[in-house]
Amino acid sequence: MSISLKAMEYFTTVVRHGNISKAAAELNIAASAVSTAIDQIEATFELELFTRQRSRGVQANASGLAAARKFEKLLDDYRSVLAEGADLKQALSGSLRIGYYAPIAPAFLPEILTSFVPASSDVTLHLEECDNESAQDGLLNGTYDVILFVSKDVRPAISFDVLVEAPAYCLLPATHTLANQTSISLHEISKEPLVVLNRPVASSYYRSLFDSQHCDISIAAYANSTEMVRSLVGAGFGLAVLNMCPLTTTTYSGTSVIGLPISDPLPPLPLAVAYNKSRPRRLVQHFLAACKDHFAATGSQRCIVDL
């Protein structure tokens, strides 16, 4: 018995959603057709590829995830054939699912993507902001093709490439009395109220910086997005310590902020890219090359504040 490309598409959609009804809705077909395709594939392989849970949908097991990855590659190659005909080697089509834990990814990710995905291409991008743990989970379970994340506490099964080491810097209102300095120390920062980016990895990292210099701090506000931190700093609630900066000094609220390098010797946060290195799809390979080219050129200098 052979497996049709349509059945492969149904299968990979179910793996992504973990639910037959949601997959059927995306594919605009009956749920029974999706169930039949799954049954046929399992019968062909003589394997159970999903764990079925009445109240929680279906969950692909290890064999199911492996099959989904191979089906995705076959589907990607098939779409490339249809899209470019004779020029197969240059064809880029299909979907690219990126999970990112990088609070200022909007400052650089669109530029990276436009460098290899033309506006007229048959590529669908799925970008999802997540925390460091769910980014790694998503890569391992097949939700994401590639992730951008902070390479701290990395799962043993994940291999990665560091793109940039981002040093900590201080964010101040442009009108602050310390804003005219060329750099600032943690002791100077600790004398001011702080606005803290309250995200996994980030908050504990920032706390460890002050602890390493034996600085007591007073926290004025916690915020779980970089732009809210920037807007609170711009409004005068306090100073903040961050690692990467957008390419604008204007906040959402219209106030101006400035970044100063921190003079103390502090460990940076590494921004890394991770993917399945065993058989990366063509789109993933292009994305990886674009990321490395971007940060090897001017990308790293544009988004960090250094001495």
Image (cartoon, rainbow, N blue to C red):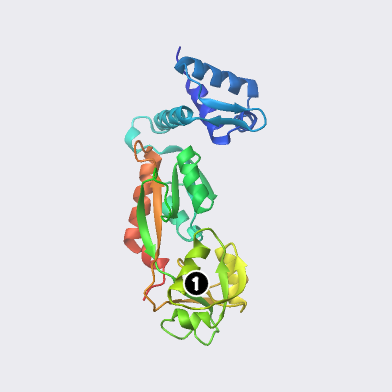
Q: Is residue 151 above or below residue 265?
A: above
- Where residue 201 appears, as percent x and y from the top left, is 49, 59
Q: Which residue appears at 50% of the width and 58% of the height?
A: 106
In this rendering, position of residue 294 left or right of residue 122: left
The N terminus, quarter of image: top left
Residue 257, compared with residue 149, is above or below; it is below
In the depicted view, which residue is nearer to us: 142 or 80? 142
Along the viewing direction, whichever of 155 and 103 lies nearer the viewer: 155
Estimate the x, y position of residue 78 in percent, counting from the top left. Answer: 42, 28
The amino acid type of the residue labelled 1 equals Val
Q: Residue 142 in the image: x percent, y percent?
A: 48, 38
Question: Looking at this rendering, what residue extends furthest in the top direction?
Answer: 1
| Rendered view: 244 above or below 8 | below
* Residue of label 1: 241
Q: What quarter of the picture does the C terminus occupy?
A: bottom left
In the foreground, 77 or 277:
277
Residue with the most extreme bottom position: 177
Q: Residue at x 43, y 77 (%)?
A: 213
Residue 231: % across, % down = 60, 71
Count the marks: how many? 1
Q: Secondary structure at mark 1?
A: strand
Residue at 47%, 15% in the rendered image: 44
Instruction: Decide if residue 254 is in sight here.
Output: no
